[in-house]
């Protein structure tokens, strides 16, 4: 496991409780959880952008930049995976006989 993967795993573990399903909660709680996940996603991307800009200005070290980029990459990969699963589920629903 390289350092980039280790940082990405740490970042994912820190945000995992936001995306963990809670079977005892209703639909309103699911929407709230999705809202929190979207907010966390946006914050992760914004933080990565801030660190990248600071690194270009010489105000951040390369380790912080690599960590921020790895967390951003993991957040994007997670969002793409969720999107793919939602599209797949929607297509399955469309294929169901009426």
Image (tube, grey):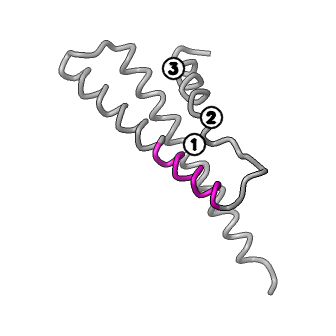
Q: Report the quarter where the C terminus lies.
A: bottom right
Residue pointed to by mark 3: 4
Q: Is the magenta region chiefly helix, strand or loop?
A: helix
Q: Quadrant of residue 62?
A: top left
Residue placed farthest to the right in the image? Answer: 97
Q: Establish if 97 lies above or below 76.
A: below
Residue depth check, mark 1 versus mark 3: number of the one nearer the observer? 1
Q: CA distance from mark 1 to mark 2?
A: 11 Å
Residue at 37%, 31% (x, y): give it: 48
Of the two numbered discs 3 and 2 on the same chain, state the one appearing first in sequence: 3
Q: Is residue 30 magenta?
A: yes
Residue pointed to by mark 1: 78
Question: Percent from the top left, x then y, of residue 12?
Answer: 58, 30
Mark 1 in CB contact with mark 3 (< 8 angstroms)? no
Residue at 54%, 26% (x, y): give it: 11
59 left or right of 62 in image: left
Q: Establish if 89 lies above or below 38.
A: below
Residue segment shown in magenta? 28-39
Q: Report the quarter where the N terminus lies.
A: top right
Residue pointed to by mark 2: 16
Question: Percent from the top left, x then y, of residue 47?
Answer: 36, 32
Of the two numbered discs 1 and 3 on the same chain, state the one appearing first in sequence: 3
Q: CA distance from mark 3 to mark 2?
A: 18 Å
Residue depth check, mark 1 versus mark 2: number of the one nearer the observer? 2
Query: How busy is the neighbourhood of tag 2: few (under 14 within 10 Å), some, or many (20 plus)?
Result: few
Residue at 74%, 69% (x, y): give it: 92
Q: Establish if 78 lies above or below 28.
A: above
């Amino acid at each position: 496991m390289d350092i980039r993967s280790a940082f990405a795993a740490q970042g994912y573990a820190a945000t995992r409780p936001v995306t963990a399903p809670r079977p005892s909660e209703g639909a309103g709680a699911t929407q709230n959880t999705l809202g929190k996940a979207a907010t966390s996603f946006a914050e992760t991307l914004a933080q990565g952008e801030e660190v990248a800009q600071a690194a270009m200005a010489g105000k951040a070290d390369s380790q912080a930049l690599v960590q921020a980029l790895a967390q951003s990459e993991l957040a994007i990969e997670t969002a793409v995976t969720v999107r793919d699963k939602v599209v797949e589920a929607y297509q399955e629903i469309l294929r169901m006989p009426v």
